[in-house]
Amino acid sequence: EVQLVESGGGLVQPGGSLRLSCTASGFNFDDHAMHWVRQPPGKGLEWVSGISWNSGNIAYADSVKGRVTISRDNAKNSLYLQMNSLGAEDLALYYCVRASDYANAGWFDSWGQGTLVAVSS
Amino acid sequence: EVVMTQSPATLSVSPGERATLSCRASQSVSSNLAWYQQKPGQAPRLLIYGASTRATGIPARFSGSGSGTEFTLTISSLQSEDFAVYYCQQYNNWPTFGGGTKVEIK
């Protein structure tokens, strides 16, 4: 069974940083591109960032570019999102998502349950 | 960036009726279009990929059609468990989502 378990969310002050993690199991992690998708409370889905199987292809949404860094460790079956300069607009549930494709996108066939990032002074 | 626009924002349908949801892309995405269902408190679930292929375990009452810039998700006979929010997503380039359509009980 495919499992994606996020961690690292929490309450942070404006301008602060967080590192989100996602641990994968039940499949060959390095056969898939991986992504982060976020959802503000009561709102829709927003793609945040994606990384190809070998980290050779990475992209970010304009809304987070320059403030976040995605990475992965295939030996540890783990995906990460380093988030800096956090603001109120970053308040959301952050999902770790598996793509069907190894390269960049593909459809999203497995989702974690999400980790909540809250920004408040 | 490819902008995805879904309509309507809310669709009121009686159980047993047909629901038709639309999704439009700002430029052609070929057939690289997926649909997801999300219920309150749950992560999204993949319904359709390749514009028209049902994901594993998805009932036949869900069907997708379209290519290029115009896409449709049809639920042929709404069941109680189908009332949810539906999102389209293009993956022709780095992905983008539509704003969602909430299907509610009429």
Image (cartoon, rainbow, N blue to C red):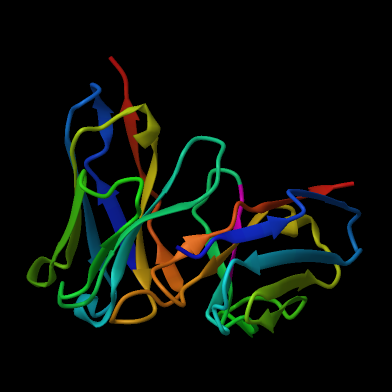
Q: Position of residue B4 (x, y in %)?
A: 58, 61
Q: Position of residue B59 (x, y in %)?
A: 70, 76
Q: Residue at x 21, y 77 (%)?
A: A53
Depicted A89 relative to depicted A6: above or below: above
Q: Position of residue B84 (x, y in %)?
A: 69, 52
Q: Quadrant of residue A18?
A: top left
Number of callouts in the render?
0
Quadrant showing the N terminus of chain B: bottom left
Depicted B91 relative to depicted B16: above or below: below
Q: What kind of secondary structure does the magenta stretch mostly adopt?
A: strand
Q: Is residue B34 left or right of residue A2?
A: right
Specify start and end residues of the magenta stretch as a single range.
B35-39
Q: Is residue B78 left or right of residue B58?
A: right
- In the orientation shown, which residue stands out farthest toward the top? A121
- In the orientation shown, which residue stands out farthest toward the left? A75
Q: Is residue A68 left or right of residue B52?
A: left
Q: Is residue B80 left or right of residue B94?
A: right
Q: Residue at x 17, y 62 (%)?
A: A78
Q: Position of residue B15 (x, y in %)?
A: 89, 57
Any part of residue A81 in sight: no
Any part of residue B75 in sight: yes
Q: Residue B28 in magenta?
A: no
Q: Residue at x 31, y 26 (%)?
A: A119
